[in-house]
Image (cartoon, grey):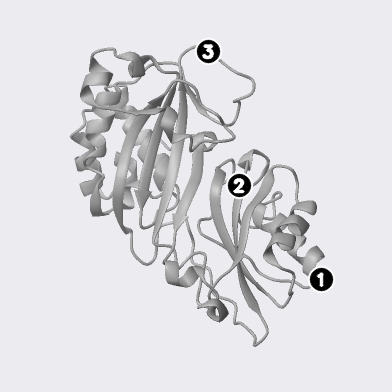
Amino acid sequence: MTEPQSTPEPTVHQRNVMLRIAYRGTNYCGWQIQPNGPSIQQHLEAAIEKLTRSQTRILCAGRTDSGVHAVGQVASFRTESQIPCPQMMRGLQAFLPDDIIILHAQDVASQFHATFSAERKRYRYVMQIGAHRSPFLNELVHRLRYRPDVAAMQQACSHLLGTHDFRCFESHFPNKATSVRTIQEAGFSFCGSWNPWDPLDVPTHQLVNHASAETGGRTAHAEFLVFDIMADGFLYNMVRAIVGTLLDVGTRKQNPQWMQQVIESRDRSRAGMTAPACGLYLVHVEYPQSLLQPELSR
């Protein structure tokens, strides 16, 4: 999901600025500049150039694919501009479309790199269950016409935890370095209502356990099913491939133990289909606190 990005060489008078960004990915070919359509990177670099009157390259925490959304993408760029961060936020926003929002801007250490400095990333995949359809959620959630066996899916999640070679969930572009990643959290929660503008509204969520999923408790009839996963990094299409594999367990095509067999195979063809991009959100990226402060303020 993230490709290596080289670090631009800083000059003596350059600042290193970090941005936290939210965007609806529906109308974009992804984060990275592509010849076949508009991208998030393209709009941000154009906005920075208009505001600072100089070109720069912006780096990101994760190169989201076409149709994937973000409520906590992190990017960084170097600039000689001395515009304070609050004014920079407002200035950049004036040059951006309404579906790309700058949430925060701050000066950071010169060693900070939006990609390589990241310690952990959290993604969320949102599914709407049942026959009810809303025109306002189109392309913001993945709609399931059936109610999956969430208890079995939750059980399958236990095989994801820890450090493994996750090559079985990597699509199209094999990682030339390593496909070993460490997953710290993976699991489902039910949500009776869901706000697409605030996907992290955690208090409305009820964590899945075997009792609530199997006994038909209140949460088992909730309209939205949310999958959260946190790891030290992700491979290309890894989260969507994991969701597709878990849904094979949820439809009882496979049992929960099958997940371990898939991981051990290191074979993409053994795993499930890649889930649609519309349900996926990059929600949070963690960095060392020492890098989030510019040198002058240390």
How packed mark 1 is, by other alpha carbons closer than 10 Å (few <14, some 14-19, many 20 or more), is few
Residue, disc 2: 22
Say what secondary structure mark 2 lies in: strand
Total labels drawn: 3
- Kind of residue indicated by mark 1: Arg
Q: CA distance from mark 2 to mark 3?
A: 27 Å
Q: In this view, which residue lies farthest toward the bottom?
A: 12
Residue, disc 1: 53
Residue, disc 3: 132
- Kind of residue indicated by mark 3: His
Q: CA distance from mark 1 to mark 3?
A: 49 Å
Please tell me which residue is depicted at 32% across the width and 21% down the height of the picture: 251
Q: Is residue 214 left or right of residue 293?
A: left
Is residue 64 among what the camera can see?
no
Please tell me which residue is depicted at 65% across the width and 57% down the height of the picture: 41
Q: Position of residue 2 (x, y in %)?
A: 48, 58
Q: Which quadrant holds residue 262? A: top left
| 293 w.r.t. 123: above or below | below
- Kind of residue indicated by mark 2: Ala
